[in-house]
Image (cartoon, grey):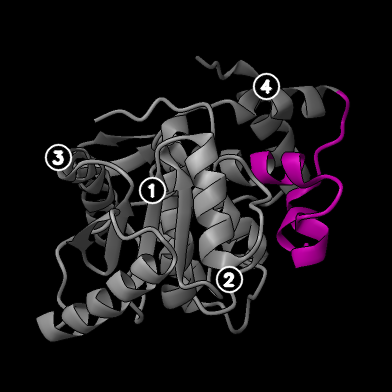
Amino acid sequence: MRWLVALYVCACATASSDPRDRFADHIAALRKRLADKGLGKMQIRIEGPFVVVGDTSAAALEREARTVRWATSHLEADFFAARPAKILDIFLFHGANSYEHGVMTLTGERPDTPYGFYSKAQGGMFMNIATGGGTLVHELVHPYVEADFQNAPPWLNEGLGSLFEQSDERDGHIIGLTNWRLAGLQQAISTNDVPSFKTLTHLDTAQFYGEHSGVNYAAARYLLYYLQERGKLRDFYRAFRAARTKDPSGYATLVATLGADDMPAFERSWRAYVGKLTFP
């Protein structure tokens, strides 16, 4: 299954280990909420730890739920030891108009992205699934990081999310593919506008999502892509998670994982490596 999507993606879910009555109570409350909002015709399907909701047919929703199932099963197998503790809803809207209307109706706010987003405060994800499955897989990563890696820095959270927004399977493992972020990163490399890895890993939330967020996303993504292609990503994630108290940025763990005595030299070689990548 190959998700060649030129937009960022969210992740999918496996069969639930939660008690069925917990889901029953959640769905009963969800159905009432939808009915009260004039959205009572939306279809609902359990894909634990998520509930998938769509303004489409049951058959179409089942196809989309398989994306959730595939992604979450692989993410749990390769990275995340803990699942989200709370049942989260995934609202899938099949067009820009229904997406904007649905988000406004359910949250009271207009979406600030045309593709989709995860909101901890709203207890779920909201997607314009007509743009493709990429945003779904990307956003699925975020509640898993919340549950599995307390206080993960933004570069790791968004690096993993954006890595899997264009994903495939290799030897039974989920992998990220090159994607639309590559061109912008290559341009930034050519003008020497990419932060060092020490700087990138130490950016706080305001800095990461600030003026240079596009380059920050891309640099984090292709750093993790490099680790993936060298067979080091899963070990790096686990080592960083274990060392997060003493190494909250992950930089020391990154240096140890790379075995790099000279990080400026490594970064030059990484930039050359990125320069040779292609998409599509």
Task: Name the amino acid type tagged 2.
Answer: Ala
Q: Which badge, 2 or 4, is on the more N-terminal residue?
A: 2
- Image coordinates for residue 15, horizontal then vertical, percent: 14, 63
Q: Is residue 16 visible?
A: yes
Above or below 2: residue 176: below
Residue 22, quarter of picture: bottom left
- Image coordinates for residue 21, horizontal then vertical, percent: 13, 85
- Image coordinates for residue 96, horizontal then vertical, percent: 53, 36
- Left of 21 or right of it: where is 156? right
The residue indicated by pointer 2 is 152
- Left of 234 or right of it: where is 20? left
Residues drawn in magenta: 191-218
Number of other residues with Cα within 10 Å of mark 3, as a class: few under 14, some 14 to 19, many 20 or more: few
- Left of 255 or right of it: where is 197? right
The residue indicated by pointer 3 is 59
Dot 4 lies on which element? helix
Measure how far apart labels 4 and 1 are at the Cα level: 29 Å
Q: Which badge, 2 or 1, is on the more N-terminal residue?
A: 1
Residue 248, quarter of picture: bottom right
